[in-house]
Image (cartoon, grey):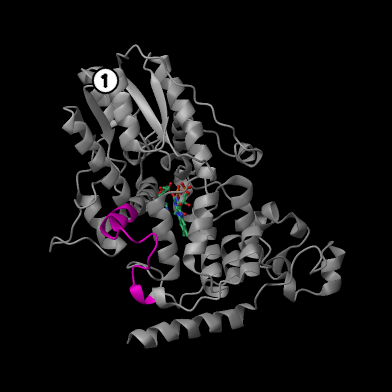
Amino acid sequence: MRILVLFRRDLRLLDHPALAEAARDGEIVCGYIKKESLTSAHDYWTMAHVADIKQALNREDVPFLLGEGSVVEQVNAWCDRYDIDAVYFNRSYLHDEIEREDDLIDSLENKGIKTKRFVGDVLAKPGSVLTGKGEYYKVFTPFYKALRQKPLIEPVKKPTTFSGLSIESDDIAFKEPAWFKKLLNHYTPGEHVAIEQLNTFLEQALSRYSEGRDRPARKDTSHLSVYLSVGAISPRVIYQAVMAYDEVGPRVDKEKEAFIRQLMWRDFSYQQLYQHKEAETKAMREEFDRFNWENNQAEIERWKKGQTGYPLVDAGMRELYETGYMHNRVRMVVASFLVKHLLVDWRVGLDYFEHTLLDHDRQNNALGWQWVMGSGFDASPYFRIFNPITQAEKFDPDGDYIKRFVPELRQLSGQALFRPFEADEAELKRFGVVLGEDYPHPIVDHKSARERALSRYQEIKEASS
Ligand SMILES: Cc1cc2nc3c(=O)[nH]c(=O)nc-3n(C[C@H](O)[C@H](O)[C@H](O)COP(=O)(O)OP(=O)(O)OC[C@H]3O[C@@H](n4cnc5c(N)ncnc54)[C@H](O)[C@@H]3O)c2cc1C
């Protein structure tokens, strides 16, 4: 049988159910359909992984095709040109992609071409973890407890032998812009790099994860999101490796559990977006769609550039710009600052993250913003407004993270670093900082911004009661 394996956000050989079965069932060719125009960091990051997987498959004598545009048209064209008998792929859990998969299946089956859809990149299929009443969980902790009790899907092995069709591979030629190349100084694409990253994390950081994961200055989280986002590694492989990690003892067990819990947030997001397909564009609690935003363009630009005058917010936005990644704790702080201190529509932040994050993931991004906004079902309540100063004092106590990304404040320490706007002018000057010249005055006053946000929230609460 001549089989086409369609790759999407699963750019790997290990634990690729469609590839594993195709390698058993017949002769194969693999293909990927790229976006017509590449614009975001994640788009280029994806293409770097497409190039990596092509090389890996070619080493096994499996040809690789690169298409563009409509999935239905491109796959049908390949099937006609190469006389394909069957198309295999791993499923998506995003509704627009599911519709495209359904159209593809209809079009192929009409021509007598077989199709097989395999499990996508989750620990448990959305819809398979339900409450006693057979409903989706709305809140993470009971979802996590239920998922913890469930036998999870086992990863599948990388095929040991492949039989490739005799087809010429396409070139993967795309021009990486200079701004993207700069991000590659921080993250290297590739399935083998993802596996190495997992092993490094297990050996060097897992044992202090529960405390370290909230410290942006440390490298105590796995940074595996960048690889998960393109499917260079699967969540099942990560889960299995963590559980099997051979260092044992109650302390390590606690750390493993803390990490697995975090990994399961990803499955929770996938399940939530599977159930609420509009959660990328609409507030899950609909009263939040009536929120009276300021959306001040000049302020949005200052937020994006890391020029708000709040050192932790600025460090986070500059980390994102410089590296394509931002620490989770800081994502929460900058997102809260945008939607609550500046009263900017959460979708502005969602779009900016989509454009700039290497690890952009539609489900995690949507749920992350809805969580911060307070508009998700399991979300931080709106009235919980992160104080960007105390967050810095608590989670970056030595100021190392701020100093790394806001170099103009590097000479400062203690309160002057966390609250330069309250420091003595002469003292700041001694360390080379003149507010308004070297570093901005705060864009808003924390206390009044907090009160303004709470009163806007009160408006939607009253309108909906
Ligand atoms: C506003 C906002 C936007 C976000 N956008 C994205 C996004 O586009 N892509 C993305 O992958 N994550 C997103 N997150 C979630 C989280 O910030 C990242 O998954 C995490 O920082 C990735 O770093 P890590 O791999 O080192 O995490 P680790 O702490 O090592 O965690 C391991 C894995 O668990 C999962 N995970 C951890 N925390 C979360 C979480 N809060 N929600 C869902 N999954 C989680 C991720 O897959 C992560 O790779 C967002 C969070 C917020 C608050």
Viewer-proximal residue, 249 or 416? 416
Q: Is residue 429 left or right of residue 382?
A: right
Q: Quadrant of residue 243?
A: top left
Q: Is residue 105 left or right of residue 197?
A: left
**Residue at 66% from the left image edge and 68% from the top image edge:** 298
Viewer-proximal residue, 292 or 212? 292
- Residue named by callout 1: 23
- Residue 336 visible in the picture: yes
User: In the rendered structure, does residue 222 fall within the stretch colored magenta?
Assistant: no
- In the image, is residue 394 above or below residue 178? below
Q: Residues within 10 Å of mark 1 (few under 14, many from 20)?
A: many
User: In the rendered structure, does residue 285 fall within the stretch colored magenta?
Assistant: yes
- In the image, is residue 62 above or below residue 141? above
Q: Position of residue 141 (x, y in %)?
A: 30, 61
Q: Which residues are magenta?
A: 269-287
Q: Amino acid at mark 1?
A: Ala
Q: Position of residue 122 (x, y in %)?
A: 30, 44
Viewer-proximal residue, 177 or 317? 177
**Residue at 53% from the left image edge and 53% from the top image edge:** 327
How many numbered dots are placed on residues in this image? Answer: 1
